[in-house]
Image (spheres, rainbow, N blue to C red):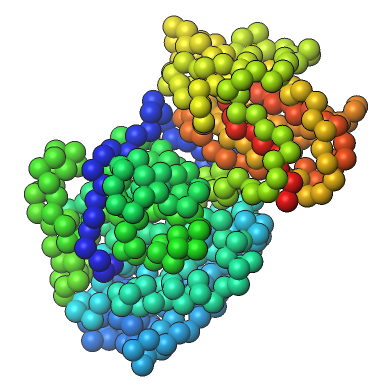
Amino acid sequence: MRAPLVLGAAALILGLATAPAQADAVAAPDISVTNVKAHLTQLQNIATANGGNRAHGRPGYLASVTYVKNLLDAAGYTTRQQSFTYNGATGYNLIADWPGGDTADTLMIGGHLDSVTAGPGINDNGSGSAANLEVALAVARTNFQPDRHLRFAWWGAEELGLRGSTAYVNSLTTAQKREITGYLNFDMVGSPNPGYFLYDGDNSDGTGAGPGPAGSAQIESTLAAYFTSIGVPTRGTDFDGRSDYGPFISNGIPAGGIFTGAEGRKTAAQVQLWGGTAAAFDPCYHSSCDTIANINDTALDRNSDAIAYAVWNLADGGGTTPPPTGTTVWEDTFETAKGWTAGTGDTATSGRFERADPAATTSQLGNAAGGTYDLVTGATAGASAGANDVDGGTTTILSPSITLPTGTLTLSFSWYLSHLNNATSADYVRIRVVSGSTTTTVFTQSASATDRAPVWATGSANLSSFAGQTVRLSVEAADASTASLVEAAVDNVKITKA
């Protein structure tokens, strides 16, 4: 990491969410900090054996690439070393693809592997490199098979100006760039006097360079939900071009990540927030003392788990792809009534879908994804978290008739599903297309026996197979488990023609 630190001033706000937001029924695994530290020890040993550093063009850097590559090859990844030249020396990026998933909807996870010449670079950025490596190995150990394609990257020559990541992005065609629908960057996640900063994807801090590309806010909120679940407050840090997300956001790719601080000093308010001392977040930043002793194990542990949480949730059902562009065929933001009607065969005894201005509870957001109104299960608050949630079966609400033209059609929407750990996979929110006597499910998010707080996510579905037909959209939620708490909402429904 190279540029001066610029921190946002305001807290990242998650509303009333008190439990982690999950977009996938498969829970993220706990990442062993012992394993992450073992990788850091290997990087330290590599630096020690190669002149004390792992810098661009030095033997310690290539040895670091080889160490990571060997582990990923053995785990079943498809890896490649991409070479580039800077300052008369050859540098390398290591790219690792996990088999499966939609390559047109690729989630990338990256961080730089090089150090400065002054030291071994164990926090900057052995910490992010090792945490990403262990998350990648956890993907293989659990045989995680998400909807999105997963691609991990370890960048070279970041310390000389983001040279490796820039070379990678510049090597991509326009179509290949479009396939990368989200990039997560992890650079310095174990600072010895740590803060907990998240890249400010939605510009809620209102400072600096502004928000990231569309979809960045979803990455930020997903990471923030994890920290909320463990009771750790977070603050925003600006997209200031400091690290390898730079060439991605410059090309319109959504991005986000975690940062525990570099040479900047922790303020008294931050000491009160996170503990530590009113000193540099990392007093060994870009120095010879950035060794294995320069790591806060608690921060490293929390952030490694947060990385896994983001990968598991964003890769399977919680994508960051922005709404598609094109001609709008039909749209409903629910700010005016357009004739949605309740299902006639519903069995839910409470919490039925309605167009409403929802009340805020711990399981229901008081704000729509846009504007004031949304489709929500049981809009009023009631006396407890479980009041007015979905009970006793299914609830359905149907759109008015929509005549679809011929062509490539895409449905986009905002949604959330929240529940407590008494839910099961039988509980769900889903969207179906009704055409004549045929009903087709185009989106389903199932619950699981874990707490999930309400956090807006975006979804999409290809409706081209319904081109030329007159259809209705059916939004449904179910509490099919015994005495489980389930809430759901949908907003900003749009059908576009490419």
List x then y, in percent, for residue 99: 64, 64
List x then y, in percent, for residue 100: 66, 60
List x then y, in percent, for residue 121: 26, 72
List x then y, in percent, for residue 106: 59, 59
Residue at the spot 54% in from the left edge and 48% down from the top edge: 320
The total number of labels drawn is: 0
Can I make out residue 465 in this image? Answer: no
Q: In this rendering, would 291 be left or right of 471?
A: left
Q: In this rendering, would 401 be left or right of 32?
A: right
Residue at the spot 9% in from the left edge and 54% down from the top edge: 279
Figure check: 496 above or below 452: below
- Closest to the observer, 419 or 278: 278
Residue at the spot 45% in from the left edge and 21% down from the top edge: 366
Figure check: 479 above or below 169: above
Q: Residue 224 falls in which quadrant of the image?
A: top left
Can I make out residue 264 in this image? Answer: yes
Figure check: 431 above or below 180: above
Q: In this rendering, would 342 be left or right of 58?
A: right
Q: Residue 61 falls in which quadrant of the image?
A: bottom left
Q: Residue furthest bottom?
A: 88
Figure check: 233 above or below 244: above
Q: Residue furthest right?
A: 437
- Closest to the observer, 45 or 84: 84
Residue at the spot 74% in from the left edge and 46% down from the top edge: 497
- Pick the quarter of the image with the N terminus: bottom left
- Closest to the observer, 200 or 99: 200
